[in-house]
Amino acid sequence: PAYEVPLRRKQAVLKIGHRGASGYRPENTLSSFKKAIELKVDFIELDIQLSKDGQIVVFHDPTVDRTTNGKGEIRDYTYEELFLLDAGSWFHPNFSNEYIPLLSEVLDISLPDTGLIIELKNPHLSPGIELKLADELLKRKWDSEKFAGILVQSFDKETIKRFHALLPEIPIGIIVRYNPKGISDSFLNEVSSYAAFVNPKRSMITPNLIERIHSKGMKVFTWTVNDKKQVAKLLSYDLDGITTDYPDLF
Ligand code: G3P
Ligand code: CA
């Protein structure tokens, strides 16, 4: 790969809080990110998309239906409209004040102590998001230590490559869905020319796969592990990071 993932280990394997601490708080909200920080994650994982007016918002689904009191596609709402939606009550009535945050708000509360793994989500619905993200990060004029706390990932190789061309200092990774055929050597060879880590779904992880990814010079993360026994098993492997909704599980 072009560079190493800067490991910020608070523990032997990186603890990555999925959408914050989404087992305990409504996903991708500031309360979820603050809870993840309280539970001492190394990295917060979050999803970004663009609003109708081109703001970078933290949100997972293509529509607002599941996790807010609104309806319809996120890209059809301006940020001002999104801000008014209740993004917490679906999880528990206590969180009715939670809203869809801007990425900039999360950058402000997490770094430098807690890193961020920013996922470019549904990139075909947010054209131009790679450039917006590069601008958002560059305008902060961070010192190298802060920059070292940011990783960017996507399922979409083209999106990842576009972002990498814009801001090569930030390590990038490719997320891999379950595929019964496994992960081929030709895939690993190709992504190792730009990616610093591979993030396969947990059901694909074997000691052999970890070794193959490591042999290409990339780190190995996995998602999403919410079962204590599975965490214990994975901790016996040579993994680099585990993504969980319950960051106090290990
Ligand atoms: O870190 C990978 C994981 O977040 C990908 O799945 O659907 O939770 O974004 P998803
Ligand atoms: Ca994600």
Image (cartoon, rainbow, N blue to C red):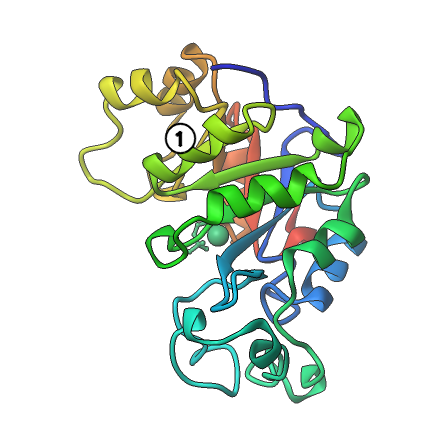
Identify the residue shown where x is 42% and y is 69%.
75
Q: Residue 142, position in %: x, y? A: 78, 33
In the foreground, 239 or 177? 177
Work out which quarter of the rendered image holds the C terminus and state it: top right
Give the structural element (helix, strand or loop) at label 1: helix
Picture quadrant where residue 235 is located? top right
Find the residue positioned furthest to the front: 53
Kind of residue indicated by mark 1? Lys
Q: Residue at x 52, y 53 (%)?
A: 227
One can see residue 142 in this view: yes
What x and y, as percent, mark residue 77? 48, 76
Residue displayed at 64% across by 62% down? 102
Place residue 160 in its image quadrant.
top left
Which residue is identified by label 1? 161
Q: Quadrant of residue 192?
A: top left
Vertical side of 95 occupied by 170: above or below: above
Q: Is residue 223 visible?
A: no
**Relative to 17, residue 85 above or below:** below
Q: Is mark 1 within 8 Å of ligand 1?
A: no
Q: Position of residue 173 (x, y in %)?
A: 47, 32
